Amino acid sequence: MAYPTDTNATEVQIIDAIIASALREGLVISVYDGEEWTVKCSADREAITAAIGTTDETRLALRRPVDGKFEIIGGVFLVHGNDGYDVIADHTDTPAMAAILADANMIADVHEERANRITLTPGWGFGGQTV
């Protein structure tokens, strides 16, 4: 993987899940960095990951090659640099996209739950419990 070196590890796990799912479905991915489409209709995982996270926002367009053309499946809007689990800021709301994002959303939910746990201080009578 060729993500920029400062990419949050949680974001990498979530984005990897999106890319893996899309590529398994035979889709190609285009990457928009806020100024230009730096990767267009590609299945090259290294090129895709290298282009993600180079700016604060990334848009992914997912397409299916059909008869020499590209049928749009949907898009994902990523916002980088927050808590990591919230990297997926928006996406196309269709059954096809829900299926592609299922693994990524599950990973995000686990990280969000972990981030929202509170460890109670032993001196307060709670014995260091995590709730």
Image (cartoon, grey):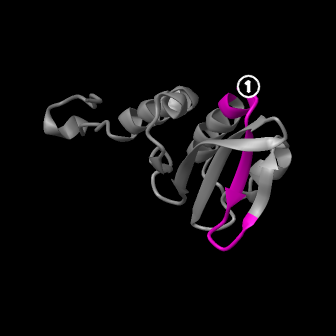
Q: Residue at x 74, y 44 (%)?
A: 70
Q: Amino acid at mark 1?
A: Arg
Q: Is residue 113 left or right of residue 96?
A: left
**Which image quadrant: the N terminus?**
top right
Give the left or right position of residue 8, taking residue 107 as reference.
right
Residue depicted at x 62% and y 36%: 18
Q: What segment is highlighted magenta in the picture?
A: 21-37
Viewer-closest of 48 and 113: 48
Say which residue appears at 71% left-offset and 70% top-offset: 36
Residue 9's x, y, as percent? Answer: 62, 45
Residue 3, position as x, y percentages in the image: 75, 52
Question: Residue 21 at x, y = what percent?
Answer: 66, 29
Q: Secondary structure at mark 1?
A: helix
Residue furthest out toward the front: 67
Instruction: Tell whether 54 sits left or right of 76.
Output: right
Taking depth in this image into account, of 24 and 110 the one nearest to the observer is 24
Neighbourhood count class around disc 1 (C-alpha, 10 Å): few under 14, some 14–19, many 20 upward: few
Pick the front one: 64 or 123:
64
Split into 4 quadrants, where in the image is the C terminus?
top left
Which residue is under mark 1?
24
Can residue 107 be seen at all in this image of the molecule? no
Count the numbered circles shown. 1
Depth order, front residue of 75/88? 75
- Residue at (77, 34) in percent of width and height: 66
Relative height, residue 54 to residue 130 (above, below): below
Asked if residue 27 is positioned above or below residue 40 in the image, the reply reads above
Is residue 48 a member of the stretch shown in magenta? no
Question: Is residue 46 visible to the viewer in this orientation of the structure?
Answer: yes
Left or right: 102 as drawn, with respect to 130:
right
